[in-house]
Image (tube, grey):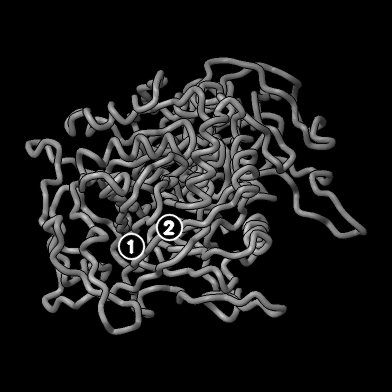
Amino acid sequence: MERDRDDGIAVKGENPAALAVADAEVDGKAQSSALSSTLFLDRVGQVILTFNSDGLSWSMVQSFNNDESSCLGVKLAPKVVTEIKFSDVYAVELIDYGLVHESNLPNAGKFLVGHDNEMYWFKVHGFQRSKSQPSLWVLSLFTFGHNDPQMCQMWVNRINASLNLEMGRPRNLLVFVHPRSGKGSGCKIWETVAPIFSRAKVKTKVTVTQKAGQAFHVMASTSNQELYSYDGVVAVGGDGFFNEILNGFLSSRHKAPYPPSPTDIIHSADGHGSSLVHHGSSGTVAETSYRNEDGSPLLSSTVQNFNQDRDFPFSEEQFRFGIIPAGSTDAIVMCTTGTRDPITSALHIVLGKRVCLDVAQVVRWKTTSASKLDPCVRYAASFAGYGFYGDVITESEKYLWMGPKRYDYAGTKVFMRLRSYEAEVAYLEVESGEANSTSGRGHVSGSIRALWSPNKSERVVCRVNCAICNDKPIHVSMGDPQTTTYSRPEKTRWLRSKGRFLSIGAAVISCRNERAPDGLVADAHLSDGFLNLILIKDCPHALYLWHLTQLARRGGTPLNFKFVEHHKTTAFVFTSFGNESVWNLDGEPFQAHQLSAQVFRGLVSLFASGPEV
């Protein structure tokens, strides 16, 4: 299913307007990079097509005075597209013989030798950025025709040779489709984007899941050798479905050291609420914190085996994840592509885009207060939330039949009976120079100041080629232990907060979505190596509602309240003092009385490039 570009020209089909004039002189020089031929561009007319080192360009053989519009006597630029880069082309295909249509340009007919004739033609499939929404990529199709089939074949061969030089484009993908995700349109959405993969000659092994946990089981049980035969895995669904696939992949491959448990933290007697890590019952040694090559703190522990089968180590640098949005919120797609559009996501995948993504390792030590110590590891790529967030996801599970609307309904019900929970949180202090924004508190007053900067405009939002995400090495290998440390380890300092909380949230990324256009933390990054810990203390319902309304506003200031704390950290621990304790991990409920979390910088790669400016 293709959509017209918003430049006003739909380029499809072909136009043999008497191609007697079209002599493409291809001698020995034609094989050079400066190849040019006279062809017909469907619905445009006769053009001179030029093969450049980085793409194709064309110009009209006859220029039409009417191809420009004017306003108040000022000539506007013509709407005709005259070039496309190979990096924006995902396929080229040869059509033996077909109809080419006359030009759509005003008064162009008199320059054409015929109308709606047949000739040999080839199609160049690519995309263009929407003028109104730069992150939205729209399919474009350029059809060129000639009377000589060898001429068309030569152009197809040359273009394909250039496309084969484009690095990182996948050739074989494993695809999981969640048929009931979101509005239950997973299969329909896959049928919409599947032709893009077919044209790009990307092989896909498609599995439509029949039950919960099926994708997790497949990813966890597939050997590295078999998984290595694919360039990546694509999830057609929402954030929760991607979380299932990610956990299946990491559960058997990423055996990282655990963060300390809450019982590993001893409260120091310095009177400032800080504490140091010591030897705990779990055996984890974390009195000192070491730093990786990229400068991010690592919590030391016994290093475990990282690979499922050591005889065939897995190359995670080559392997990538893709998401075709079909869920209720699709926050991860919104943050990594800038838009919630299946076509755009499919184009990011077939064009081989790459962006690294932080992943939080969440360890549940105890399910309830009466449970025995039994570590259970889960991973989150977007968000972990407790209190209000956990209550909403728990309530929404009762109304799955409502589709995405269940979150609004469940959120309203939970807010009407809003409860606070007594808990304690300890988080690893980060030096002010390491975080790109400082933590602190805002004020509820007439002049609300920015939480981490006195000037809101100083916030650096994550975009394509983000300097913050790219300033240091961000890849953490799953195949080798985390060994390289500084020779002079430094002690860590844990800060704690105890009391009654309406909610506790840990955002790995900004978590933008249609309900929160700027996300929970507007300047959170995809791979900066930090968790954004948001602690919301008990407060009047009206103030919490004000906080929620700020989340729903573009340009809002949800963190600028005195009952809200925002801290950038690399790890935190949590203990509940109540009977109920449910967390929300990437849209999935997770019961935990005691919990620890740490972030791994750039642990996985996605087929994405980040939101456009």
Report which residue position mark 1 lands on. Answer: 572
Give above or below for 25 relative to 512.
above
Please state the horizontal and vertical placement of residue 340, each as a whole percent of the image.
Answer: 57, 42
Give above or below for 426 relative to 504.
below
Tell me whether the residue at label 1 lies in contact with that at label 2, contact meaning CB atoms closer than 8 angstroms: yes
Callout 1 amino acid: Phe
Label 2 neighbour load within 10 Å: few <14, some 14-19, many 20+: many
CA distance for labels 1 and 2: 9 Å
Residue at point 31% right, 31% down? 216
Q: Is residue 53 visible?
A: yes
Give above or below for 408 relative to 440.
above
Residue at point 34% right, 67% down? 427
Q: Nearer the viewer, residue 533 or 236?
A: 533
Please state the horizontal and vertical placement of residue 536, each as a whole percent of the image.
Answer: 52, 63
Callout 2 amino acid: Ala
Dot placed on the residue nearer the N-terminal end, 1 or 2: 2
Q: Quadrant of the N terminus?
A: top right
Please state the horizontal and vertical placement of residue 55, each as a whole percent of the image.
Answer: 49, 45
Residue at point 48% right, 52% down? 387
Label 1 neighbour load within 10 Å: few <14, some 14-19, many 20+: many
Residue at point 54% right, 58% down? 520
Please state the horizontal and vertical placement of residue 518, each as a whole percent of the image.
Answer: 59, 58
Badge 1 element:
strand
Report which residue position mark 2 lands on. Answer: 506
Q: Which mark is residue 159?
A: none
Badge 2 element:
strand
